[in-house]
Amino acid sequence: MKCTICNQKAALHLEHHNLALCSDHFPEWMCKQTERTIQKYSMFRRDEKLLLAVSGGKDSLSLWDILWKLGYHADGIYLDLGIDQGTRYSCTSGEMAQAFAAQRGLNLTVLDIRAKYGESIPEMGARTKRGHQKPCSQCGLVKRYLLNKAALDGGYDAILTAHNLDDEAAFLFSNLTHWSMQYLGRQHPLLPATTGFARKAKPFCLLYERETTAYAYLNNIAYVYSECPYATGSKQLRNKTYLNRLEDEQIGFKYQFYTGYLRALEAGAFPAGQETPEVLEQYRCTNCGQPTLSDGLCTFCRLVKKN
């Protein structure tokens, strides 16, 4: 197969775009698609200060590379979750993130959860009824809180995450099957800043995981290949498997599924859930001052205070 642009050997066939691209033109296409998404949803500008959540994986490092090439000022933050029991997962991920930043002269902040709060994510989970086997719920809570805090404390205009189309489609599938209206009302790729919460954006939301993987490979980006050991058997991975089957039968299914949802969301089909600014601003955490759904400590402070 030949590249649609230059007629050289194609490196990737993008069936849903009816496009084949070589190793030179595919990275250029990725940059253009990312820029198009940023502009489409008015995510952020080049004169703004951005904070990117970096995991050491292909998606976050590829996004950081593209933002750097496009001229956006994005610092990185790596949260060391302490998931190293027999795997060195967090250790290896951190090494990949730091090596990437050093090679490009980019600024990366490393926050060691255990050093800061006295426990790793697995240790926090072990103390709870829901997380004693898999601390995924506690992990999500801690990451959301600390990323938001880092953005606010550092004076950043927006938090960026590298969730790709496969991620977003799987989240949407789960939220629809459970009719989780509070989440269905908030899965837009851009969440504006509100009191106590930084703006959040997902520039890779319309790009397939296959495409971000190919970008990392063609640009010689070293990244951690393994999934989080706690992801095995997760609902998210099962949902991705189901959606992959549908994608095999109907090329472009994930794209149509997610973008169709976005059109419905923007038309008002899914009202925002209970975590709206109007509700959250009724209470403030008595320890950290962050907005919370109830009087007293917020969920994060309750978790870390138990230590």
Image (cartoon, rainbow, N blue to C red):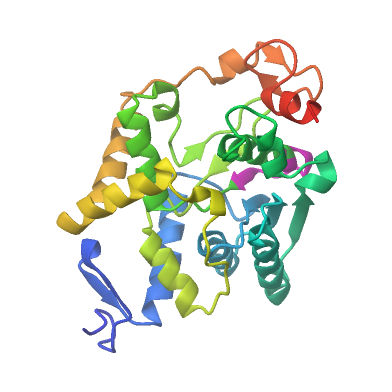
Q: Residue at x 54, y 21 (%)?
A: 275
Question: Residue at left 60%, top 39%?
Answer: 135
Say whether residue 52 is visible: yes
Give the side of residue 44 with respect to residue 21, left or right: right
- Which one is nearer the viewer's eye here, 247 or 27? 247
| Span of residues in magenta | 150-159
Where in the figure is residue 119, as x and y percent of width and height?
A: 78, 41
Q: Position of residue 56 (x, y in %)?
A: 61, 62
- Image side of residue 268 versus residue 151, left or right: left
Q: Is residue 291 above or below residue 114?
A: above
Which residue is at the front of the view, 223 or 50? 223
Q: Is residue 189 above or below residue 104?
A: above
Q: Which image quadrant: the C terminus?
A: top right
Using residue 289 as the reference point, say whether residue 96 is left or right of it.
left
Of all residues shown, which one is farthest toward the bottom?
8
In the depicted structure, whether residue 31 falls above or below residue 115? below
For residue 151: magenta?
Answer: yes
Q: Position of residue 193 (x, y in %)?
A: 60, 32
**The N terminus lies in which quarter of the figure?**
bottom left
Q: Verify whether residue 40 appears in magenta.
A: no
Q: Is residue 137 left or right of residue 12?
A: right
Counting from the top left corner in percent of width and height, residue 287 is at 82, 21
Give the residue at x 36% y 58%: 208
Q: Is 283 located above or below residue 133 in the figure?
A: above
Residue at 52% x, 53% y is: 162
Of all residues, the one furthest to the left in this rendering is 249
Q: Is residue 255 visible?
A: no
Among the 4 quarters of the image, the one containing residue 181 = top left
